[in-house]
Image (spheres, helix red, strand yellow):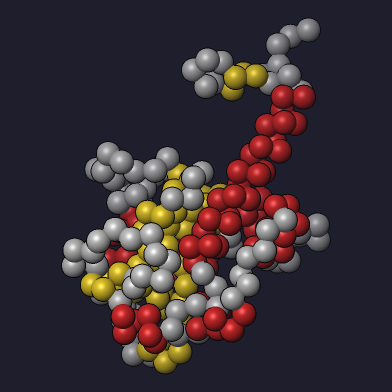
Amino acid sequence: HTPVSERADIPGAVCFDCEMGYSTMGMELIRLTATAWPDGREVLDVLVRPQGEMLDLNSRFSGVWPADYAKAIPYSDPSPESSDEAAPLRIVESPTKARELLFELLTPAAPLLGHALENDLNAARILHPVIIDTALLFPHPRGLPLRFGLKMLMKKYLDRDIQMGGAMGHDSKEDARAAGDLVRYRLGETWQRMKGQGWWIKGDGEFCPPLPQ
């Protein structure tokens, strides 16, 4: 379960995405990325050393390659701030450490955003009480287990192309930000509908129902 973070600078909500590969212990977490919502600022992006011997990084989907591990910088080492997307990733020694770093960015009441989050939550071994999943926010008309992919949702609702790396695989930072942008789109759409019904906001930010006629 998500503990209460003692950090004072935690985001109000966090988007996250995980990448997984295959080891001798099954499917394991190999990268965990978190961005602040709604601005998309990176707050965590680490490679994760699996517990078992790595068999397949699933690179064509995960976007994680052997060279990324070879160049990775230990998370405990000081690292200069860099906006270079090609800069080496930091690496932590276990999924447990990656989870602890994510928990530092959350409180139990902070929304955790993403797409098809059951996969990410299982990989990171996380139980969190407030989840916003774009796979459910934009449901398939024929219902579960059918659901739309993140790439299709981004193109349909925001006219943006993502996951264009081809054989190079996905970028977990791009996917985390995409899920956050879809949530913001849906919130804006919902608020426009509520305003049309007479809802309004007080000066302190409280939502108020339509006034009696």
Q: Residue at x 41, y 71 (%)?
A: 86
Percent of width and height locating residue 132: 56, 49
The percent position of residue 12, horizontal first and vertical second, equals 42, 40
Q: Is the N terminus in the top left, top right, bottom left or bottom right quadrant?
A: bottom left
- For this rendering, which residue is in front, 123 or 149? 149
Residue at 81% in and 61% down: 142
- Which of these two is toward me, 27 or 174? 174
Q: Position of residue 188 (x, y in %)?
A: 66, 37
Q: Quadrant of residue 11?
A: top left
In what quadrant of the picture does the C terminus appear? top right
> Could you say which is closer to the camera, residue 22 or residue 43?
43
| Residue, far right | 142
What residue is shown at x 31% (from left), y 80% (from top)? Answer: 71
Does residue 117 appear anywhere in the picture? Answer: no
Which image quadrant is residue 82 in?
Answer: bottom left
Q: Is residue 68 left or right of residue 139?
A: left
Percent position of residue 105, x then y: 34, 49
Furthest-top residue in this view: 213
Q: Residue furthest left?
A: 77
Please indicate whether residue 50 sits to the left or right of residue 111 in the image: left
